[in-house]
Amino acid sequence: MKKAADFTLTENRRLTDRFSLLTLKGDIPADVQPGQFVQVRVDNSKTTFLRRPISINEADPATGTLRLLIRRAGDGTNALCDLEPGAVVNMLLPLGNGFTVPADKSTRILLVGGGVGVAPMMMLGRVLKDNGLQPEFLIGARTAGELLLIDEFRKIGTVHTATDDGTSGEKGFAHQHSVLACAGRWDKVCCCGPAPMMKGVAAAARSIGADCEVSLENMMACGLGACLCCVEKTVAGNVCVCTYGPVFNVKELTW
Ligand SMILES: Cc1cc2nc3c(=O)[nH]c(=O)nc-3n(C[C@H](O)[C@H](O)[C@H](O)COP(=O)(O)OP(=O)(O)OC[C@H]3O[C@@H](n4cnc5c(N)ncnc54)[C@H](O)[C@@H]3O)c2cc1C
Ligand code: FES
C-alpha cells in the first residue's frame, strides 16, 4: 500500500563530497521489497517543486528504519544531502515493483551496481541472504574513493570491484569485468546504474546465458503513473517505469 508519511532524519553520513547516506525513522509498510523506491518531498529547496525518486537502500519495517543513498545531482539532491538530524522528511512509499527473489536457494546470483546504482543492491543482497541464497556483488565507480558501502556489502557476500582509473579491482567499467564473462558461473544477474552500463551488463548476461533484471532510472515527475513522463518502450508496448517498473527483466526491453 502506498502512503505519504513523515520520517525523521536520525543520521546523515557524508560518505564523500558527492554522496550522503541518510538514515530515517518512520512507519514503513511491511510489504516493502528490494528495488522499490520512495518519492521524497524536498522542503528545504526553494527551486524543487516535484518530489524526487530515490531507491530504498535498506528498510526495516520492524524498527521503522529506512536508508537512502543520495548523490548530489542538482538542487533537490543537494538539499537532501544538506539535511541535518532532526529534519522531518515527507515521503511516498513504497513505489514501483521489486527485484525477483528466486525460490531456488542454489541460484547463483551476481548483483551489479554502478555509482549511486549500488543503492538498491544493499537491501536486495540482504534479502537474498536472509532467504538462503549466497549473492556476490560487482561494484563499479569512477575511483576507489567512490566505491560506496563496500565494507557493508562484504558482510553479505563476496565483492568484486571495477574502477574507471584502476585504483581498485579491475580497470574499466563494471560490465567489462572478468567475473561477468564466466560462462556457467551465474544463473541470474541483477543490475542498477547508468544506462550504458546496464545495457553492457545485459549483453554480458545474455552472452553467458544468465537471466537478467535491471532497475531503470528514467526521469520521473508524479511517480504514480499519471504524468507519463517516465515511459519506456518494451516488447509489449510503452509502459510507465514508475508503476510497471523500475525493475524489468531485460527480455521485456527493446535493448
Ligand atoms: C527509480 C529511481 C531511483 C533513483 N534512485 C536514486 C538513488 O537511490 N539515489 C540518488 O541519488 N538518485 C537516485 N535517482 C536519481 C534522482 O532521482 C535524480 O538524481 C534526482 O531526481 C535529481 O534531482 P535534482 O533536483 O537533484 O536535480 P535536477 O536539477 O532535477 O537535475 C540535475 C541533473 O540530474 C539529471 N537527472 C534528473 N533526474 C534524473 C534521473 N532520474 N536519472 C538520471 N539523471 C537525472 C538531470 O537531467 C540534470 O542533468 C533515482 C531515480 C529514479 C527514477
Ligand atoms: S513519473 Fe509520472 S507516470 Fe511515471
Image (tube, grey):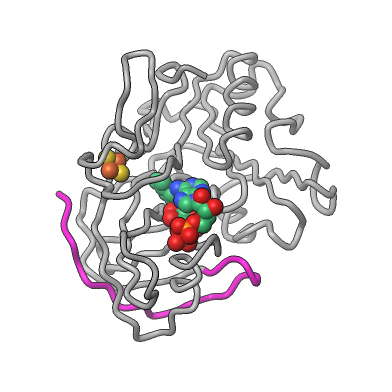
Magenta segment, principal secondary structure? strand
When the figure is inspected, residue 47 is found, relative to residue 195, above or below; the finding is below
User: Quarter of the picture for ligand 2?
Assistant: top left
Residue in the foreground of this view, choosing between 38 and 60: 38
Q: Give the quarter of the image for residue 40.
A: bottom left
**At 35% from the left edge and 38% from the top edge, which residue is drawn?**
230
Where does residue 49 sit, x and y in percent of width and height? 32, 64
Q: Give the quarter of the image for residue 183.
A: top right
Q: Decide if residue 226 is on the left or right side of residue 190.
A: left
**At 34% from the left edge and 82% from the top edge, which residue is drawn?**
87
Q: Give the quarter of the image for residue 228.
A: top left
When the figure is inspected, residue 175 is found, relative to residue 96, above or below; the finding is above
Q: Decide if residue 167 is on the left or right side of residue 233.
A: right
Residue in the foreground of this view, choosing between 62 and 69: 69
Does residue 66 belong to the magenta stretch?
no
Q: Which residues are magenta?
A: 1-20
**At 56% from the left edge and 35% from the top edge, which residue is drawn?**
195
Residue in the foreground of this view, choosing between 42 and 12: 42
Where does residue 70 sit, x and y in percent of width and height? 50, 63
Where does residue 55 sit, x and y in percent of width and height? 41, 52
Does residue 18 belong to the magenta stretch?
yes
Residue in the foreground of this view, choosing between 57 and 159: 57
- The answer to whether one can see residue 196 in this image is yes
- The answer to whether one can see residue 123 in this image is no
When the figure is inspected, residue 190 is found, relative to residue 96, above or below; the finding is above
Where does residue 237 sit, x and y in percent of width and height? 32, 17
**At 30% from the left edge and 33% from the top edge, which residue is drawn?**
240
